[in-house]
Image (cartoon, grey):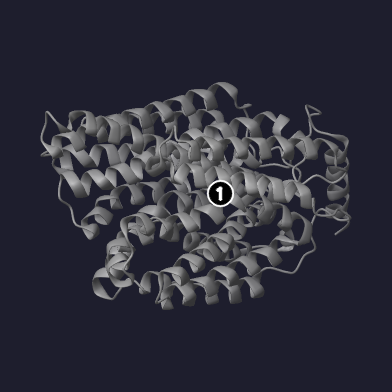
Amino acid sequence: MTHSLHGKRRWLALIVLCLGVLMIVLDTTIVNVALPSIAADLHFSETSLVWVVNAYMLTFGGCLLLGGRLGDLYGHRRLFLGGITLFTLASLACGLANSQLLLIAARAVQGLGGAIVSAVSLSLIMNLFTEAGERAKAMGVYGFVCAGGGSIGVLLGGLLTNLLSWHWIFLVNLPIGIAVYALCVALLPAARGHAHGERLDVAGAVSITASLMLAVYAVVNGNEAGWTSLQTLGLLGVALLLLAVFLLLEARVEHPLMPLGLLRLRNVATANVVGVLWAAAMFAWFFISALYLQRVLGYRPLQVGLAFLPANLIMAFFSLGLSARVVMRFGLRRPLAVGLLLAAAGLALFARAPLDGSFVVDVLPGMVLLGIGAGVAFNPLLLAAMSDVDPADSGLASGIVNTSFMMGGALGLAVLASLAAARSEALAASADATVALNSGYHVAFLVGAIFAAAAGVLGGAMLRPGMAGGPPRQTGEGVDARTAESSRDTGAAAENG
């Protein structure tokens, strides 16, 4: 069992796991800076270039739940190593790609490997750190990697593309992936899956994976195809139908892919709804502010990455130390609410950023508030999403919260980009192009601020008070007999082991 590790080995294992997660997080943004170079080299058209990003998002979003459950059934360490291997080999294929088809196919495989790593890494960390204070600190490190990795990706992408070539944004993953694999083999003992005696719910896996993939496809192509087009509405309708089929299957099968009792756990359900809103706000901050810096203020890619550095440093300060102490002192509810409301204030500041804005006056204050808000809120949100879950379902709970973040971010970004584009188009005839563009960004920032504020209010009102660092609490509220029995079996095994 992973929790048999003691002392420094657990913290070394945490660093290695977070390095693997950072590699996945970086890859979601590092490619954005290199897209013009990729298009010129491989002769992508504007419409086909989006598939360099969408192919990754499609498999990543569609396979998170499946990856988490496979980890529960067959061992989180085994699945983590498999995901790292898949992601590293796909990165090699991306770096060596000399055609559009090869690059897009390799990006899809990257997404599959990334989904597996993301889904099981949180479970491994939760099982490594069972004491309340240590778990809060460990989740702070994980939260910093997830929250700050995207900004680092922009900086690293600009650096590698400018100094070397776009191939190196993928090839840089090779030494990292090899090191992570070797260190995980050395540090993490082999362990069987927690869900002994269960079989994979194949019908449930197929229906939910297809549903998520169709939903992601519809969302990422919504702006291009039109949100009211037959394609978008049809795909979303089929995705909802498959989701309904999945829920019916899960209510009837003996060993469901997702025990529906998880969704009746108050903290789990609340944290995932908050996660959807918060991810939408985070994507608004990261992507729309990057566009504002480039297209309105004229920043170069490397300057954009440097502009995010203050927020990254602040998130590091809070996530790597202070956030854990805040959670131990005030519990989950208040830090989550305060952090998200601070982030909402930061987005509101960006909603008034002028055409001739200066970094110190118009960019830095919003970045500081968003850095503090993300650093304070991310840790309690992740803890709340995993707090009431039995160890046998930890991989699944991790997959659910990751899916909430991905779907919330993808849907939120698509909606906010559509609102920004609609506002800019409405002003295009009567205003300068840059003025119209900036006005559209203002709308996106304002709606993002509303999302973050709504998430803060919901978390503050609905989360159960208390610290989620101890053993899972089985209160009988919506937890089925199978989950309760699994909890007793796990506890007995821990005492005997």
Q: Amino acid at mark 1?
A: Met
Q: Residue at x 67, y 28 (%)?
A: 266
Residue 402 in sight in this render: no
Q: Quadrant of the C terminus?
A: bottom right
Query: Which residue corresponds to mark 1?
Result: 139
Image quadrant in which you'd find residue 362: top left
Residue 72, given in percent of the width and then of the height, sits at: 75, 54
Lateral position of residue 389 relative to residue 181, left or right = right
Lateral position of residue 192 relative to residue 270, left or right = right
Q: Is residue 132 above or below residue 278?
A: below
Q: Residues within 10 Å of mark 1 (few under 14, many from 20)?
A: many
Q: Residue at x 61, y 65 (%)?
A: 83
Q: Residue furthest front?
A: 230
Q: Residue at x 84, y 49 (%)?
A: 490
Lateral position of residue 10 relative to residue 315, left or right = right
Q: Is residue 34 above or below residue 268?
A: below
Q: Quadrant of the N terminus?
A: bottom right
Q: Is residue 406 above or below residue 331?
A: below
Residue 470, given in percent of the width and then of the height, sits at: 70, 41
**Nearer to the camera, 400 or 417:** 417
**Nearer to the camera, 220 or 124:** 220
Image quadrant in which you'd find residue 50: bottom left
Q: Residue at x 48, y 76 (%)?
A: 92
Total numbered badges shown on the rendered structure = 1
Residue 432, given in percent of the width and then of the height, sits at: 10, 35
Residue 344 in sight in this render: yes
Label 1: which secondary element: helix
**Nearer to the camera, 328 or 202:** 202
